[in-house]
Image (spheres, helix red, strand yellow):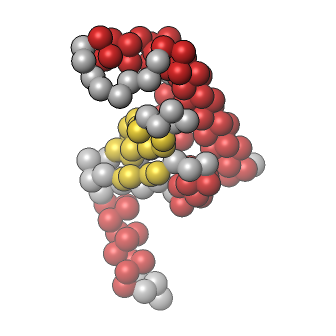
Amino acid sequence: GGNLPAVAETRLFLRVHLGGGQMKDKYREVCESLDWSVHEYDDGTVELEKYSPAGEDFSFTVSSASPVDGIKEYAAAFDIDEHIEMWIEAKKNGVRGVPSARELVYDAENIDKMLQELAAALAVVEEDEDA
């Protein structure tokens, strides 16, 4: 022990012993400042969620062991065309409430911008830490 209060001590114990790369508060703050909701799960994953301009409840999951790397990789790999095609396919299959193709294009481009913005903001915080 030391003089850590019991709660902090317990939290520290859990983090160390469960290999839990819990998402650091400063990364969480960056995400939340850009309107992303952050959900951490016991299975070692972190889900990031944000509504797109067209109202899509967009979310993706990364490993809590290296969430920033996961987010940067996801953002780099996000395929605008694939995202549009997925929704056009869904519309063909009778999914209700899918917007027009034009709106889907606009929205997918905006989702890409949201992801790039998030990755860039986290990279800045990460560089500050490494400095």
Q: Residue 34's x, y, as percent?
A: 61, 48
Q: Residue 17's x, y, as percent?
A: 31, 60
Q: Residue 53's x, y, as percent?
A: 55, 35
Between residues 100 and 131, which one lies in front from this camera angle? 100
Q: Residue 11's x, y, as percent?
A: 37, 71
* Residue at 60%, 35% in the rendered image: 114
The image shows residue 58, relative to residue 102, as above or below, that is below
Query: Is residue 4 in view?
Result: yes
Q: Could you tell whether 8 is left or right of 72 in the image?
A: left
Between residues 56 and 82, which one lies in front from this camera angle? 56
The image shows residue 26, relative to residue 90, as above or below, that is below
Q: Could you tell whether 98 is left or right of 93 in the image?
A: right
* Residue at 48%, 14% in the rendered image: 101
* Residue at 47%, 88% in the rendered image: 3
Q: Could you tell whether 123 is left or right of 16 in the image?
A: right
Q: Could you tell whether 124 is left or right of 110 in the image?
A: right
The image quarter in which residue 20 lies: bottom left
